[in-house]
Image (cartoon, grey):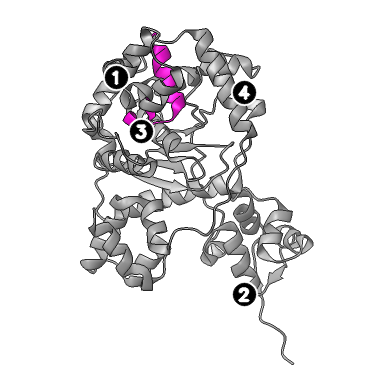
Amino acid sequence: MPSRATIAVAPTLVKWARVSAGLTVQKAARRAGIKAARLTEWEETAEARTTPRQLERLADACKRPVAAFFLPAPPTEPPPPLDFRIRPTADRPALSSTTLIAIRRTRRLQRLYADLDGDTRAAKTLPRLRLTDDPERAGGVMRAMLRVPPEASAGREPHEVLNLWRAAVEQRGVLVFQFGMPIREVRGFSLTDGVPAIVLNTKDHPHPRVFTLVHELTHLLVRQPGLCNPDEAIDVRQAIRTLGGETGRPFDAVEVFCNAVAGACLVPLDALLARPLVQAFQRERARLEDVVRDGVATFGVSRYVILRRLHTARALSQARYDQTVEVWRAEAGRAVPRRKRGGPAPAQRVVSELGRSFVSRVLRAHERQEITGADVADYLSIRLKHLPRVQALVATD
């Protein structure tokens, strides 16, 4: 019986593929369905050989094309985005394979969009904010830029509010993607690299995602994109002191500003203070929980954002604010998360993940015969049989 065909693999390329995906030898081997000792051999022995099927499985585990294992040498890739997560460096979760691959995928999608005649001038035409700007005024500038009136979110379901703000951001030439990542690790990130892009975490509730979206847009406007884990309820410097870190870092000022601008954009103080329940609360004739509930329904944000804005407006004392946050966090800790069943249909997943701007650009390129059906399937990560439904969903915009 003839022996199976095997392929010589370069140890440096095998190790590069695994390490750049954030995988340990054990995890990569498990995903590829091979023994860890075999993978170690491929990484350390120049004479090591693999079967075509084994190489395909390893490529899939590392989210690399098989052709990447035949490059002359490991390519030089850009480093991860700047890390603006508020925890002290020693306490920050290391970037997982899931997040590293999401960053890599975003950069590829940015390049594809630009190659498909995308307008790479968007980053230059976005207004510029400075950290010395007044956050309330900057939030007003951002809301005017996005053309979202204060009452636009009233009565909408959380996903509808998210889609409203996402569409407004995309209309300014910013790509908005949504991928699943460990929620404790990162809630969102932003990149420029030609076409500006924002990535939201699908494991987050839609209301916090709205805040993260505007927070990351602020990062783009101050020209300092990066990885973030924004918390609508906290004062960044106070949080760092609580976590045992040091304030005064350059990144602290950026996060403080982005948090403040996001709150001002989403919940303008004049609109908030004009609410009858807020006015009644200031006269001690309304309950805080009713005021917060009304604010959430009106502005389409989380209750933490409303609470924070009430505090900013001096309608709520620091002591009452801290006490309420503590109670809410305790309640959230006791809550039992609901299991999700199934998932969206393939066409809905594509539009939700990649956004209408990117998907529409790919579909137009295909209609003009600039790319093949195989390209469409690759760019959108979908089988061509689902394409008519994708086209129908985008056409409803």
Comparing labels 1 and 4, the label whose residue is closer to the camera: 1
The answer to whether residue 256 of the structure is visible from this angle is no
Mark 1 burial class by Cα count in 10 Å: few <14, some 14-19, many 20+: some
Which of 152 and 16 lies nearest the eye of the viewer?
Answer: 152
Helix, strand, or loop for circle 4? Answer: loop
Answer whether residue 245 is magenta in the image: no
Magenta part of the chain: 295-314
Q: Tell me the residue at 43%/30% (across/down).
A: 302
| Amino acid bearing label 1 | Arg
**Label 4 amino acid?**
Pro
Q: CA distance from mark 2 to mark 3?
A: 51 Å
Q: Is residue 153 visible?
A: yes
Helix, strand or loop status at disc 1: loop
Foreground label between 4 and 3: 3
The residue beneath circle 4 is: 88
Residue annotated with mark 1: 275
Callout 3 secondary element: loop
Instruction: From the image, tell me which residue sits under label 2.
Output: 52
Q: Nearer the viewer, residue 23 or 241?
A: 241
Viewer-nearest of discs 3 and 1 = 1
Q: CA distance from mark 1 to mark 4?
A: 39 Å
In the rendered image, which quarter is residue 243 located in? top right
Q: Quadrant of the N terminus?
A: bottom right
Looking at the image, which residue is at 54% across and 66% down?
Answer: 66
Cβ atoms at labels 1 and 2 below 8 Å apart = no
